[in-house]
Image (cartoon, rainbow, N blue to C red):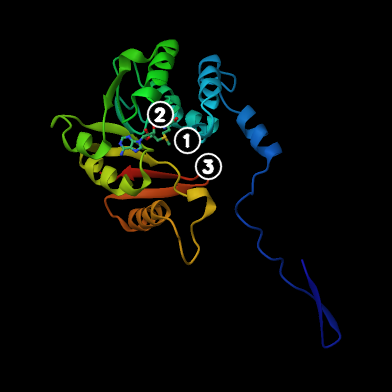
Amino acid sequence: MSITAEHGNVIMAKAAPSPKYLPLNDRLYSYLCAQRSHASDPVLDALRKETEALGDPARMQISREQGTLMTLLVAAIGAKTAIEVGTFTGYSSVCIARGLPEGGRLICIDESVEWTSIARKHWAQAGVQNKIDLRLGSAVPLLQTLESNLVFDFAFIDADKTEYDAYYESILPRLKPNGLMLFDNMLWGGGLGAAAIDHPSGRAIDALNRKLAQDTRVETVLLPIADGIQLCRKRG
Ligand SMILES: C[S@@+](CC[C@H](N)C(=O)[O-])C[C@H]1O[C@@H](n2cnc3c(N)ncnc32)[C@H](O)[C@@H]1O
């Protein structure tokens, strides 16, 4: 709060409003990772360790608390069917599949045989392999040729950023009313909100954030978790 003098009187100026967000640091991040359900998870810990051994590609893996959030959301909405675009070594797919009931189904789309072979191993270790239907190949053509009767309660988008809008438009008609669609990396490493975005992926993400905010087909909020998650609900 600042104090100013005016005409000989001391005036208490209004306190500047405190920001309604919290910058994270390593201490707080470790704390929030520890204070969640199943913080110690041998299957996910082993998957993270094996993925880290890949070196640079490991940065593509979603964060721990994001995984917990997705399990919680899938279970909270009672999702029975889900789709993921961008599976990599399987962290997000294990988290989604765990939120599904017995008999639930998750379609996973990825073009990498090498990375999804790691995922397959960990699906088996997590005991979720029977819920997962892996479709290998390029995402847009696979989405365009999905069986006509497939509908989803939950969708997670985490592949080629310049194709996110195409994934959105392919999946939204198949998302049930009140179904959820989550998009990863929607804060694009903190590079959005600036005047010029000098990367095609950043520009695509910025355009999609702006589109979603105005899109009357969905209700959406951009969560500052990990690299930013757009959480969209399809309106009924
Ligand atoms: C960010 S990673 C996904 C991370 C994953 N969700 C996890 O939790 O570990 C992106 C994945 O999308 C896949 N991918 C990228 N572009 C693709 C495309 N056009 N079609 C299919 N898969 C694609 C890559 O092979 C990679 O495995």
Viewer-nearest of discs 3 and 1: 1
Tell me the number on the disc at residue 60: 1
For mark 3, give the secondary structure.
loop
For the residue pair 104 and 194, the one nearer the viewer reads as 194
Ligand 1, image quadrant it occupies: top left
For mark 1, give the secondary structure.
helix
Picture quadrant where residue 33 is located: top right
Mark 2: few/some/many CA within 10 Å (<14, 14-19, 20+)? many
Identify the residue shown where x is 34% and y is 28%.
Answer: 112
Task: Tell me residue 81's x, y (percent).
Answer: 28, 26
Q: Is mark 1 within 8 Å of ligand 1?
A: yes
Q: Is mark 3 within 8 Å of ligand 1?
A: no
For the residue pair 133 and 97, the one nearer the viewer reads as 133
Which residue was labeled with disc 3? 225
Task: Tell me residue 127's x, y (percent).
Answer: 40, 11
Identify the residue shown where x is 40% and y is 16%.
Answer: 123
Which residue was labeled with disc 2? 88
Instruction: Give the farthest residue toward the right.
Output: 8
Pointer 1 and pointer 2: residues touching (CB < 8 Å)?
Answer: yes
The first of marks 1 and 2 along the sequence is 1
Picture quadrant where residue 215 is located: bottom left
The first of marks 3 and 1 along the sequence is 1
For mark 2, give the secondary structure.
loop
Q: Is residue 210 left or right of residue 46?
A: left
